[in-house]
Image (tube, grey):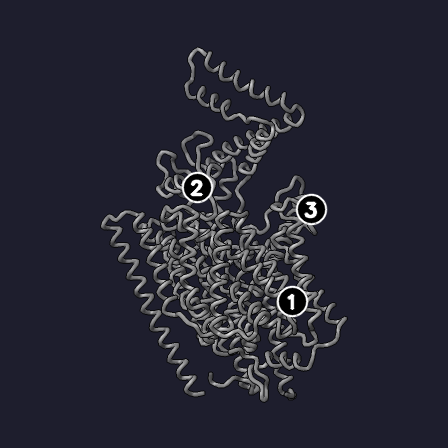
Amino acid sequence: MATAASSQAAFTQQLKKYYTFYTGGFVAFVIAVGILEMMGVPIKILGYIFLFATIALYAGIGFMSKTSEVSEYYVAGRRVPALFNGMATGADWMSAASFIGMAGTLYLTGYDGLAFIMGWTGGYVLVALLLAPYLRKFGQFTIPDFLGARYGGNIPRLIGVLAAVLCSFVYVVAQIYGVGLITSRFTGLEFGIGVFVGLAGILVCSFLGGMKAVTWTQVAQYIILIVAYMIPVVWLSMKHTSVPVPQVSAYVSVLPKVTALEKEFNDKTTPKGAAEESVRAIFRARSAEGDRKLKGLDAGGATFLAEEKKALEDKVAALKAAETPDAKAIEAAEKAVKDFPVDAAAAKKAWTAEKGASARAAPVRAHAEAFPAAGKTPEEQEKNRAIAKKNFLALIFCLMVGTAALPHILMRFYTTPSVKEARRSVFWSLFFIFLLYFTAPALAILVKFEVYSSLVGSSFASLPAWVSNWAAVDKTLMNIADINKDGIVQLAEIVIGGDLIVLATPEIAGLPYVISGLVAAGGLAAALSTADGLLLTIANALSHDVYYKIIDPNAPTVRRIAVSKGLLLVVALIAAYVTSMKPGDILFLVGAAFSLAASAFFPALVLGVFWKRANKLGAILGMSAGLLVCAYYMYMTYPFFGVNAPKWWDINPIAAGIFGIPAGFLGLIVGTLISPAPSKEVQELVDHVRYPNLEGDIDTKAV
Amino acid sequence: MQLTEKHKEYWQRNLKLTGSLLAIWFVVTYVVGFFARELNAIEIIGPLGFYMGAQGSLIVYVLIIWFYAKRMNEMDEEYGVHEGDE
């Protein structure tokens, strides 16, 4: 035992040494690329260097960790120290959505976006208190393993496999999408090719060495992503406040200024407020015009359409007949005729969009205001506010419980050497995740201040470089036009896409391109590491739980690992194929994965430890009830599916878990109480997982 | 395998600790979230409701997990259910 302990300590020391060297090497690499930039190497080449150097690095780690031992392949040999498992979990956890999307969501939605910040960190409290130590004591390979052993028989295991594959697959599609987006944006490759380049990056990490390789690459990826996130934010904070701690300066000195500017924009008596109002008046007029035409179309149909077109043509004729023809006005009028919708359906679409301009006429929302709501009467406003609050809290609940039920995260706690280390490891996991999540809201405030103070009020003739660059690259990220023709930028004239915030921060802070490349590498690391963990979860659930445990329990080790690697390849290709078709709303996909996982797994896992009486029938009923209720509600209410049934208590489909989770608990309790208590062996298993060490105990550790 | 009284006491204390920490978690998340508008009237480091959502609650979560790990690892030793040196 003593030698085992000292060898583990030596191993930890060695790891610390390796990763310190690695971090130093990476910093040197970034500096070297910076020098190349100063020597005038084109930006595109620098983008390629970052992309291929980091993927080659991950491949190198993957290759060095190649293994054909079952316990190394599935659980990294169960010798990952708490600190390093924390970093690996952090990278596993933080996806493209966290790295690139989070600060943008906060920029756009203010307080409401905090649901993601709180939900995706507070869930770890549940992981730490209710699951991680017990799963570690149980010590097998997958989450369905636990369900299979605790509830007996293949049905609970199979439902577990189904739910694990379903939510992980939905989630992995979102990750591969992020990978494709980043590679295509920073290297100019086509999206579809970007997806497959990224896929190669994912596979080289996980294919040869399974969990062992994924763990050590994830640690490396965590270091890159956190460095990449911090540098530009700290710099931006220095620029605005001369304090290099954005997490403090954003609240103490920047947020009050943002709030003051918001008030000014909404106050028509100030010069800025008046300018904003003139833009909003134009949007309101556009919206009213759209509304008028829609109503006319409903009443008059094709006749109305012809009349409208005639009116535009008359206008062109009148302009041309004028004494001093205005060339510009004629051109605009002719364009209006040319762009006139061809039929009623096209007209309806175009005019509905025009009517939607009213959204841009709304006053600026206060960043820190909780649950802002509009309404024609105070009662209506109060009602809308209550709905917003309810959805905010429900979403937090689903994200938290979902965190404590996503198999790719729970699986990571099988890899620590002991229960004690598993507990510590959850602490380190949240600590490393916290570093980024703690910073994202501050980043959102800093960028908002930059936009409100520097961009608004600047002249269209001399826009800041980052604005014109991004507006040229992608209209969905930065769309700016002089609506009221005063030559000055007003806030209502800017539309910003959420993903811009993190991607453009280096340029906003006035940093060289090398830092933009670093941020892209960080985003790529975040997406790749999460995709790795998810693909491995799916492949393991299929190879270990279905093939080995159910189909062929006598399969030799070599074949088990070969099957797993084969499946990994197949699943990865299917996921890349689905991604290249660009399915629906990514944020919804992510939310759906959380609600589904929460409803299917959480009740069965938690009651499996804390309620000895819970039995097989209960687990079957609970898991299927949770899964079905959650999926049913999403299907009925999410617009994508086209059913659009009325919502239950005004809860949005993204928080469907709020119904699925109670259904899961209810099903489990009812099913348990109508059938006999579990066998003595199962009850002993529960005692076994509850105590880190018992005399004369059974052993469930898989080898 | 027979559980002794001491074992049962260990589990009871674990449940108590878990329950209390979950209660803190609940208050920080849902009670504070529910009253966010009201708390925003108080200015400490920015409006309090916003600050709690953006940073305060996160700090509490980290502390909860740190405390649980420390306390449970001590309790394992106290009740003799700790693992060997592996």
Q: Which amino acid is tagged 1?
A: Pro
How many numbered marks appear? Answer: 3
When asked about the image quadrant of residue B19, the answer is: bottom right
When asked about the image quadrant of residue A374, the answer is: top right
| Quadrant of the rendering where the N terminus of chain A is positioned | bottom left
**Is any part of residue A210 visible from this angle?**
yes
Please provide percent x and percent y for residue A201: 40, 58
Give the letter of the chain under mark 1. A
Q: Which mark is residue A645?
A: 3
Question: Viewer-nearest of labels 1 and 2?
Answer: 1
Q: Which residue is mark 1?
A: A603
Label 1 and label 2: CA atoms lie apart by 44 Å
Residue shown at 53% from the left, 82% from the top:
B74
Label 3 and label 1: CA atoms lie apart by 27 Å
Q: Which residue is mark 2?
A: A478
Please provide percent x and percent y for residue A361: 54, 36
| Secondary structure under the numbered disc 3 in the rendered image | loop
